[in-house]
Amino acid sequence: MKILEAMEKFDPIIGLETHVELSTNSKMFCGCSTEFGAEPNTQVCPTCLGLPGSLPVPNKTAIESTFRIGLALNCQITEFSRFSRKNYFYPDMPKDFQTSQYDEPFCVNGYLDVLVPTDEGDKTFRVEIERVHLEEDTGKLTHSGGVTGRIHGADYSLVDYNRAGIALVEIVTKPVLGTGKYAGIVARAYVTELRDLLRSLAVSDVRMEEGSLRCDVNLSLHPKGASEWGKRTETKNVNSLRSVEKAVNSEIERQADVLTEGGKVTQETRHFHEDSGTSSSGRSKEEAEDYRYFPEPDLVPVIATSAWVNELKTDLPQAPSVERKRLAQEWGFSDEEMRDVVSMGATDLIAQTVAAGATAQAARKWWLGELARKATEAEKDLSSLGIEPKHISELEQLVVEGKLTDKLARQVLDGLINKEGTPSEIVQKRNLVVMSDDSSLLPAIRAAIEANPEVVAKVKTGKLQALGPILGAVMKETQGKADAGKVRSLVLKELAVEG
Amino acid sequence: MSKITPEALKHLAKLARLELTEAELAMYATQLEIILDSVDKIREVAAGDVKPMSHAVGLTNVFREDVIRPSLDRAEVLSQAPATEANRFRVPRILNED
Ligand SMILES: [Zn+2]
């Protein structure tokens, strides 16, 4: 069932659990480095390997980062909190438990407002935050053997514990009601806003493609007007902004089908597949959730004194919404233009492109135009295209200098996506040089004039707007390398017509 | 008085990945009940004005600065494992979970 049809019968309730890897230098409870991409099992020690006799000591910066996230999300900071043991046997945690927080999280009861375009104009949705707590990340499993590389059918698994013990903050929303057909857009806007907020706090590099920001989507449907909520599912593995929206919408459609056919939604964990935009059933909840939490005996309680919290509060950066207003003014963007920039997750990309020398309008043109199109084509977020903003600035400079036509510039973008080097290097390698000298252009121009006698007749009577087919033919012949202005003036000169 | 049902005990054993025979289940049921009875005695003594204690020492706010310290040598780490491959720990396949 399509989403609009489903929304005529049902109301959705969404909930989002976001995991953020903090960008501290060292891990949460030991001094191992957190550098991404290191050789497997080179950033491990007795503590993060759970060797007997080792004891954890919490990273103060990680705790302060968690408080700062809570404050930025308008939360109360819990005065007395503790870490808890979450017990489970799985080889991604060598200790056989994860140090987390349970009934005494660091921050509770906040909110984040997000702006979403609706049929009635832009509307603010308030997403309430249940809790923000601190825990440690798990190791990375690779499943070997079998055919699919997935866990089912795997013969064995390989574990790299470099990631185990990295400080991980979990941000959990309260159930979000009343979003209707905008559920997916609200979910995406929330994660986008949260990402911008975390980036402004400089607590994480928030790279979804590298897994430093990960999202689980909870969703249930109930018949319109019903007071009782439906059974919810939790979709894991949602690792891009566009997938957040897709995961919500595809789960609404799936549950609506189940309910309409008289079936029942099973409370379960589902796994999202980035490539197909759909999810598949994982383990069912009832069996899996029995973690027997208890207060962590190896770590003493944390007291958030008001002096400490106030000090962190005075140090908070401006909220992204305030910062955005400032940028929109500086860049000369209208409200709608800025909203599109934000929803595409392009604020920082444009800021960096401008910092590298491009005008704001040019930066917006590239990121929200051709690059947005390429990102959609590749089913990726803009930031996952792997294009450096300074290269876009360089590209724009080449266009301004007349060294590239728009068409050639698009080929340079392909080169940038393929990591072929800087724009200037790509221009050389791909031989993308603008043709502007008469001798190389004239043969193509004369051929085009010859092939279009009726156009020539019109132009000679003064209808210069009829030139199109001739200019197009020249561009085609020169594979888009011709300087359009130059071609136009040469054609007019050949026809002896005044431009 | 039986506080621990056989089902609850089997569930606990499963969570702890322990395979127990019927005889062992019966033995542990008896032992766990003694433990629970002892805990109940504490509950009788503890009044509402006594906060539950999670730590034997009264310390709070023990932290470390965010400074990198050397990790272990990988060859030494992996030499302790029963099986390794491609510089990773090799573990038996994980069934029915993902
Ligand atoms: Zn370590």
Image: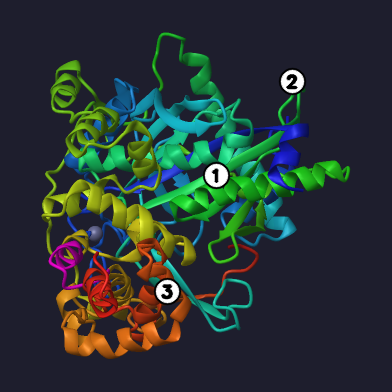
Looking at the image, in which quadrant does ligand 1 appear?
A: bottom left
Residues flagged by tags 3 and 1 on a common chain: yes
Per the image, label 2 sits on a secondary structure element best described as loop
**Residue mark closest to the camera, 3 vs 1:** 3
Nearest to the observer: residue A489 or residue A238: A489
Q: Nearer the viewer, mark 3 or mark 2?
A: 3
Q: Does residue A332 appear left or right of residue A344 in this picture? A: left
**Mark sitting on residue A227:** 2
Q: Tell me the colour scheme of the image.
A: rainbow
Q: Is mark 1 on a helix, strand or loop?
A: strand
The mark nearer the N terminus, 1 or 2, is 1
The magenta stretch is: A394-405
Distance from the alpha carbon under mark 1 to that under mark 2: 22 Å
Do the CB atoms of the residues marked 3 and 1 lie less than 8 Å apart? no
Residue B84, position as x, y percentages in the image: 39, 82
**Mark 3 packing: few (<14 Cα in 10 Å), some, or many (20+)?**
few
Left or right placement of residue B11 versus residue A384 in this view:
right
Crowding at dot 1, Cα within 10 Å, few <14 / some 14-19 / many 20+, comes out as many
Which amino acid type corresponds to the residue marked 3 in the rendered image? Ala
Q: Does the residue labelled 2 lie within 8 Å of ligand 1?
A: no
Q: Mark 3 points at which residue?
A: A457
Q: What residue type is labelled 1?
A: Val
Residue B77, percent from left and from top = 27, 74
Instruction: Check residue A217 in the rendering and tell me which mark sits there, or answer none.
Output: 1
Q: Mark 1 lies on which chain?
A: A
What chain does badge 3 belong to?
A: A
Kindly identify which chain the residue marked by label 2 belongs to. Answer: A
Give residue A310's quadrant in the image. Answer: top left
Which of marks 2 and 3 precedes in the sequence? 2
